[in-house]
Image (tube, rainbow, N blue to C red):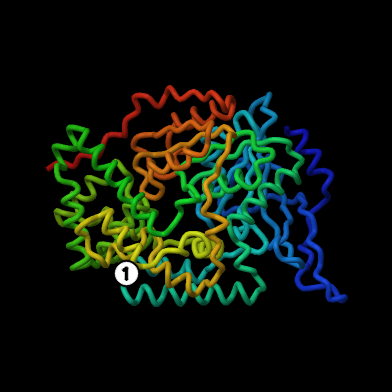
């Protein structure tokens, strides 16, 4: 495999500036869309050195921005081929599809390497279109600056709403003025990019591993471009057919309920924190009625910052896993006894933003084209009431992690793509589905939805793990390695008998 990739890269020449393909030739006829190609080049210079990139072969995949539009300009997507550490690697590499959408993909490499993804086979990384090292990069520094301010504002306050929408409008107008076709930053185009990458690298067959939004993308890729896919592994699953804004509430409920049930099953936790559900509801109501304003130091250090804790902020800190699962019962109990520092410090963490790193433009184009259409703010509120009866409507009106999203999407203004995207993937390609029982973003039960139409699938649930399971679970790493070696007969024996880590027990 390494020899094949090396030969392919050597034949493609050196990287140069992106040729301008905007507009039409002088004849007035649309410029034909150039075929995709891989152009070798230097690996990205990441803020923190990534050891695996020192031996990687890097470059750009050059593709049309919008394959459906003749004359579409060309864009470049950063990619890296990380060699296997084994002396006798498998001929079938694994390609990674990151979460987000819009998260910085190369940042995930250390987690993947530490999880053994390149132990027995080459690991291929490609940033989804619009990411940090791509051309163009759909960063929104305006939104990064807003999120740094947001920690000192009420979660659903009018000021937060106004500042968020102003930031979204500023970013959208800037990207559109640069000639970016925001409608082209979607899961269909992302999937086609990966299909083109396999062809451009000359790889007959590869394995696919994606988590969170990357599972949505991987399932779409399998549905639209099945050729060359040997096996599919998806982690923290978002089936495309159910990825809607109200769905976020059921996942939040499931992850939190599973954590509370695990506490009740552990004698020490049950004895020390006997009424967690009631206590959480009481704290959400209390904070929503009387928000706390205090100063807290970010976990990474630095000066204290102003933090506002209200009901919405508390719920979203739980959904974001901002407090680690073993500490959640203790943190809720501390809050109930007038000690909010653990949650306050977790919220203060967001005051430190790496400006320009996240491709918010991709995030909003996917969310507004694929997740939001077909639902109303009323639908989100109804889903919230089903998930957490008795909680204040002001908390339940905002989808977890996506506040004011309907208003955001009116500004972002991309076409409705739900008819093309909300489709189940039917396939006999061997599949592995990995879920964590404490996942509050993509509830573990949604694995069953994906598995129904994947006839050769194996599903595993890892107790006590939240979002993105493999880097957090040695057992999940062994299962994944076994699956990649033998897709039709993975060894899942280590899952039996797994229990969550012990919960933190505060002295009374």
* Residue pictured at 44% horizontal, 75% vertical: 165
Query: Quarter of the image containing the N terminus?
Result: top right
Q: Is residue 24 left or right of residue 165?
A: right
Query: Quarter of the image containing the C terminus?
Result: top left
Q: Secondary structure at mark 1?
A: loop
Tag 1: Cα neighbours inside 10 Å, few (<14), some, or many (≥20)?
A: some
User: Is residue 16 something that shows in the picture?
Assistant: yes
* Residue pictured at 47% horizontal, 66% vertical: 144
Q: Where residue 465 sits in the image (x, y, percent)?
A: 37, 39
Q: Quadrant of residue 139?
A: bottom right
Q: Is residue 318 left or right of residue 487?
A: left
Residue occupied by mark 1: 156
Q: Where residue 102 sits in the image (x, y, percent)?
A: 54, 57
Q: Is residue 239 left or right of residue 292?
A: right
* Residue pictured at 57% horizontal, 35% vertical: 117
Q: Quadrant of residue 229?
A: top right
Image height of 57 relative to 414, above or below: above
Instruction: Please give the count of numbered marks on the rendered protein.
Output: 1
Name the outermost residue toward the right: 27
Q: Closer to the camera, 268 or 245? A: 245
Q: Where residue 57 sits in the image (x, y, percent)?
A: 71, 43
Name the outermost residue toward the left: 508
Q: Closer to the camera, 154 or 183? A: 183
Image height of 240 relative to 382, above or below: above
Q: Where residue 374 sits in the image (x, y, percent)?
A: 45, 64
Image height of 496 relative to 12, above or below: above
User: Is residue 359 something that shows in the picture?
Assistant: no
């Amino acid at each position: 495999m390494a020899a094949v990739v090396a030969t392919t890269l050597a034949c493609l020449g050196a990287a140069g500036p992106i040729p301008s393909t905007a507009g039409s030739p002088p004849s007035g006829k649309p410029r034909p869309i150039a075929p995709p190609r891989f152009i070798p080049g230097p690996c990205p210079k990441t803020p923190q050195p990534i050891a695996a990139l020192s031996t990687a072969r890097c470059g750009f995949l050059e593709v049309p921005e919008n394959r459906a539009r003749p004359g579409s300009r060309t864009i470049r997507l950063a990619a890296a081929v990380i060699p296997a550490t084994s002396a006798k690697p498998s001929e079938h590499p694994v390609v990674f599809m990151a979460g987000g959408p819009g998260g910085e993909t190369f940042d995930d490499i250390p987690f993947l390497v530490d999880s053994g993804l390149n132990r027995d086979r080459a690991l291929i990384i490609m940033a989804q279109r619009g990411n940090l090292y791509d051309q163009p990069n759909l960063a929104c520094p305006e939104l990064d600056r807003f999120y740094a301010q947001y920690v000192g504002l009420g979660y659903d306050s009018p000021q937060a709403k106004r500042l968020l929408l102003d930031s979204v409008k500023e970013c959208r107008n800037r990207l559109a003025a640069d000639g970016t076709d925001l409608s082209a930053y979607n899961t269909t185009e992302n999937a086609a990019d990966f299909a083109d990458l396999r062809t451009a690298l000359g790889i007959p067959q590869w394995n696919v591993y994606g988590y969170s939004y990357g599972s949505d993308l991987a399932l779409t890729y399998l549905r639209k471009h099945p050729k060359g896919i040997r096996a599919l592994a998806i982690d923290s699953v978002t089936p495309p057919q159910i990825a809607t804004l109200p769905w976020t509430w059921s996942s939040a409920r499931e992850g939190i309920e599973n954590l509370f049930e695990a506490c009740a099953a552990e004698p020490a936790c049950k004895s020390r924190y006997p009424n967690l559900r009631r206590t959480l509801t009481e704290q959400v109501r209390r904070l929503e009625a009387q928000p706390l304003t205090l100063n807290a130091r970010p976990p990474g250090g630095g000066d204290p910052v102003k933090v506002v804790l209200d009901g919405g902020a508390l719920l979203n800190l739980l959904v974001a896993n901002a407090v680690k699962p073993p500490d959640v019962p203790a943190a809720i109990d501390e809050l109930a006894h007038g000690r909010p520092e653990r949650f306050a410090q977790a919220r203060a963490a967001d005051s430190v933003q790496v400006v320009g790193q996240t491709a918010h433009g991709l995030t909003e184009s996917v969310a507004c084209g694929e997740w939001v259409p077909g639902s109303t703010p009323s639908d989100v509120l109804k889903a919230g009431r089903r998930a957490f009866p008795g909680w204040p409507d002001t908390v339940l009106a905002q989808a977890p992690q996506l506040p004011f999203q309907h208003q955001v999407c009116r500004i972002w203004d991309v076409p409705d793509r739900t008819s093309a995207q909300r489709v189940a993937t039917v396939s006999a390609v061997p599949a592995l589905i990995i879920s964590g029982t404490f996942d509050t973003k993509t509830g573990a039960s949604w694995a069953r939805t994906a598995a129904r139409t994947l006839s050769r699938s194996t599903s595993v649930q890892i107790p006590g793990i939240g979002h993105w399971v493999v880097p957090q679970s040695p057992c999940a790493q062994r299962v994944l390695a076994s699956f990649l070696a033998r897709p039709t007969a993975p060894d899942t024996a280590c899952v039996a008998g797994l229990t969550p880590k012990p919960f933190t027990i505060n002295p009374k």
